[in-house]
Structure formats: structure tokens, C-alpha cells
């Protein structure tokens, strides 16, 4: 009998996995349990601090129903975003609310600099938000590179100069205990954000990220497409066999002609050395193009053409119904319309099945919240 009651409680708790708030009536509808059983279980869950009353919901003709929500402190996730320019950390609760955040700006280009920065930003949160930090039950980490989805190892990250790097020891050292860890390549966390919070989302969608590097991720049939030690490195697909040497050691990768560094070099060349490509940012080139500067416009027109080729290749390979463009390049005015025109004319999809191209409007916080949501499903609701 106790086992059956526990299963009933778990079933009720799991109805909240896709709903922030529910009434008893909605729980009855979703679980198939009797109103009496749901009422009894909800009273027990409320006494245990697992759910709490929030407010009276809208009436459907009778009395206004009381709405319930899961307890705020049931599950906290530490979500890290690691880039070549530093690390950000947020503590996020079961509802996706960001409770505390910290950032440490530092160049990260090897294991030592990553470990140091990881420790600094973690200790900052631990000191300033000790109570929230103590409630962390899982760790999510997003960074550029190829992840080994079977464990907590980065197989290769060219931007961060990492190879076969495990986060186990680092997390154990900074948190002082063993915690579940899940790694996400940067574009994976971003496509999850688009799928959860974006204005253009679909069960089959692609995300192409262009900034200082190129990222690519897919959601197929509502699930993130992953494969152990395969990160679908769109930026390292060769599109010019006699092209420039790439940081990965091969020639002609897309990343040698698309993104912040190639754009800065082309802009500086056409300015006859009047600007330093080492300090010129992608965002600056894009802003100048948006303001009508001829040199910047010529550079960004080239960038758009190269990106269009990659997007069309993605559509021909995976047939997504939506392609979202993220990163600095998404701020280039008119980008989605320009790429959409080429997609309509050149992709293999027929006229009734053309992919829609849009640009991302979400900031980093949505990626962190999406990662926390994935860990919440795995570590809380499944248990």
C-alpha cells in the first residue's frame, strides 16, 4: 500500500515537469486519479513542503481553483557558461528562476586558466550566496567543443585549447562533494533555449551560431540530437580545399572565412591597415555595416553568402522546418530575409516544405535556464 501511495505521489509530482502551476482539477485530468486521491496526496505533499499554494486561478464557471506550485528549494542547479573570454555562473531553481549570478572575465586558453577561472567564479557565489549555493544538486556546463556525452569529458575544444579534459575533479574540488554533471556544447544550450523560450520553434529545428567561431545543433522529433564524441562541427566542414589553414590543422574549413576573425582580417585589409584586426570585434564590423559603411557592408555581404551556403547544406542534410541564426551575426540587419531568399531558391526542399529562417533574440540567461531544466528532468523528476 505504501508503495502504491508513493507511486501516486511521484505521478502527481511529475505532472509539474511541463507545468509551472496546476490546480487539483488539472492534476486529476492529467493523472486519471480520483479527486479524493489527488486531494489527499496534495495535502500530504503540501505538509511535506513539496508543493505550495500560490493563488486562485481563473474560474471556468464555478469556484475559482487554487493553484499549486512545486517548492522553490527542491532542486537547484549551478549553470556555467565558459568562453574564451571568461566564465559566467548562475544558480537556478526548479522553476528556472535565476537566484544568483557571477562572472569572471579572463582569457581561457588552456586547462590551467580554465581551472583557475572556474574556481574563482564558484568561490565568489559560494561566499556571497552561501545558502543558495548549499542547495545545488547538479552542475550544468556549456562550452565550445566536442563533448563525450557518455561522461563529463570534453574530447576536444579548439577555441579553449582543451583535449580529453574531465570536469569531475574540478567540480568535486570547488563544491566539496560529488554532484551530477552534464556538459553541453555551446550551441546545444542555445538551441534548447530556442526550443523552450523562442518565438520560432518546431519539433525539427536547427541552430547555427556564428560569432568568433561557428556552432551547430539540431533538435529532431523534439529531442536534442547528440552522438558520443561527435559534435557536428559545421565550422570545420571543408568548403575550400585550397583555402587557408585552420586552427584545427586542415585547410579550407568554414571557420577560416566565416566569423569574427576572418571578418576582422578582411575589414582591416580593405582599410589598408588603418585598423588592427587583433582588436577589431565582429560586433564592430556588423555595427558599421548596419550604419551603412561601404567597407563593412562588403565584408558582411560576403559573410552572409558563406552562411547561406552552410544553412542550405544543413537543410539538405537534416530537413529542419526552422533554422535559427544566433551569435553576433544575428544582429546584421536583414540577415534572415537574405538567407531565406537563397534557401527558397537553392535548397532541395519543395515549395510546400521550405524551412523558415529566423534570428535569435534570446540572451545568455535563457541558455543557462534551459540547461538547468534539462538537469532537473534527469535528476529530479525521473527520481
Image: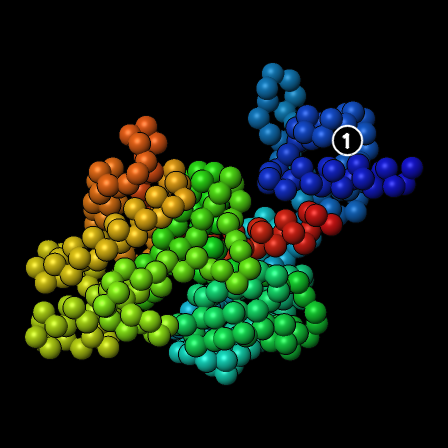
Is 128 located above or below residue 299 in the figure? below
What's the residue at 35%, 74% (across, down)? 249
Q: Where is residue 243 in the image (x, y as percent from the top left)?
A: 23, 68
Q: Where is residue 160 in the image (x, y as percent from the top left)?
A: 43, 74
What's the residue at 49%, 60% (across, down)? 230
Q: Which residue lies furthest to the front in this view?
A: 241
- Residue 374 placement, left or right of 188: right
Q: Is residue 25 visible?
A: no
Q: Mark 1 points at which residue?
A: 38
Give the secondary structure at mark 1: helix
Is 335 located above or below residue 238 in the figure? above
Q: Residue furthest bottom?
A: 112
- Residue 149 placement, left or right of 263: right
Q: Where is residue 279 in the image (x, y as percent from the top left)?
A: 24, 76
What's the residue at 52%, 41% (across, down)? 222
- Residue 357 placement, left or right of 320: left
Q: Which residue lies furthest to the top in this view?
A: 61
Is 210 located above or below residue 123 in the figure? above
Q: Indicate the quadrant where residue 295 lies.
A: bottom left
- Residue 223 placement, left or right of 377: left
What's the residue at 16%, 68% (across, down)? 266
Q: Is residue 266 visible?
A: yes
Image quadrant for the N terminus? top right
Q: Indicate the quadrant where residue 119 lies.
A: bottom right
Amino acid at each position: 500500500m505504501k508503495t502504491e501511495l508513493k507511486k501516486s505521489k511521484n505521478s502527481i509530482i511529475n505532472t509539474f515537469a511541463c507545468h509551472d502551476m496546476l490546480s487539483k482539477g488539472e492534476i486529476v485530468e492529467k493523472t486519471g486519479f480520483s479527486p479524493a486521491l489527488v486531494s489527499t496526496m496534495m495535502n500530504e505533499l503540501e505538509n511535506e513542503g513539496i508543493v505550495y499554494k500560490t493563488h486562485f486561478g481563473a474560474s471556468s464557471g464555478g469556484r475559482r481553483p487554487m493553484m499549486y506550485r512545486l517548492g522553490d528549494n527542491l532542486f537547484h542547479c549551478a549553470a556555467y557558461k565558459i568562453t574564451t573570454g571568461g566564465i559566467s555562473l548562475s544558480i537556478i531553481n526548479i522553476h528556472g528562476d535565476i537566484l544568483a549570478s557571477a562572472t569572471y572575465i579572463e582569457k581561457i586558453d588552456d586547462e590551467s586558466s580554465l581551472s583557475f577561472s572556474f574556481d574563482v567564479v564558484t568561490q565568489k557565489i559560494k561566499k556571497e550566496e552561501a545558502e543558495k549555493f548549499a542547495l545545488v544538486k547538479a552542475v550544468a556546463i556549456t562550452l565550445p567543443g566536442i563533448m563525450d556525452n557518455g561522461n563529463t569529458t570534453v574530447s576536444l575544444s579548439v577555441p579553449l585549447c582543451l583535449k580529453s579534459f574531465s570536469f569531475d575533479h574540478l567540480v568535486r574540488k570547488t563544491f566539496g562533494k560529488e554532484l551530477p554533471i552534464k556538459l553541453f556544447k555551446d550551441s546545444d544550450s542555445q538551441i534548447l533555449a530556442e526550443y523552450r523560450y523562442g518565438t520560432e520553434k518546431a519539433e525539427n529545428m536547427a541552430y547555427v551560431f556564428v560569432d568568433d567561431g561557428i556552432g551547430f545543433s539540431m533538435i529532431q522529433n523534439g529531442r536534442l540530437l547528440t552522438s558520443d564524441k561527435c559534435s557536428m562541427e559545421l565550422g570545420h566542414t571543408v568548403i575550400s580545399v585550397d583555402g587557408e589553414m585552420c586552427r584545427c590543422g586542415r585547410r579550407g574549413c568554414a571557420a577560416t572565412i566565416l566569423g569574427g576573425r576572418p571578418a576582422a582580417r578582411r575589414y582591416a585589409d580593405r582599410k589598408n591597415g588603418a585598423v588592427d584586426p587583433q582588436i577589431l570585434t565582429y560586433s564592430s564590423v556588423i555595427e558599421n555595416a548596419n550604419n551603412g559603411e561601404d567597407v563593412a557592408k562588403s565584408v558582411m555581404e560576403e559573410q552572409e553568402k558563406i552562411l547561406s551556403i552552410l544553412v542550405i547544406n544543413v537543410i539538405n542534410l537534416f530537413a529542419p522546418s526552422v533554422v535559427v541564426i544566433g551569435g553576433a551575426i544575428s544582429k546584421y540587419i536583414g540577415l534572415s530575409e537574405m538567407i531565406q531568399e537563397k534557401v527558397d531558391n537553392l535548397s532541395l526542399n519543395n515549395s510546400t516544405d521550405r524551412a523558415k529562417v529566423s534570428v535569435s533574440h534570446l540572451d545568455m540567461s535563457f541558455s543557462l535556464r534551459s540547461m538547468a531544466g534539462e538537469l532537473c528532468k534527469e535528476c529530479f523528476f525521473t527520481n
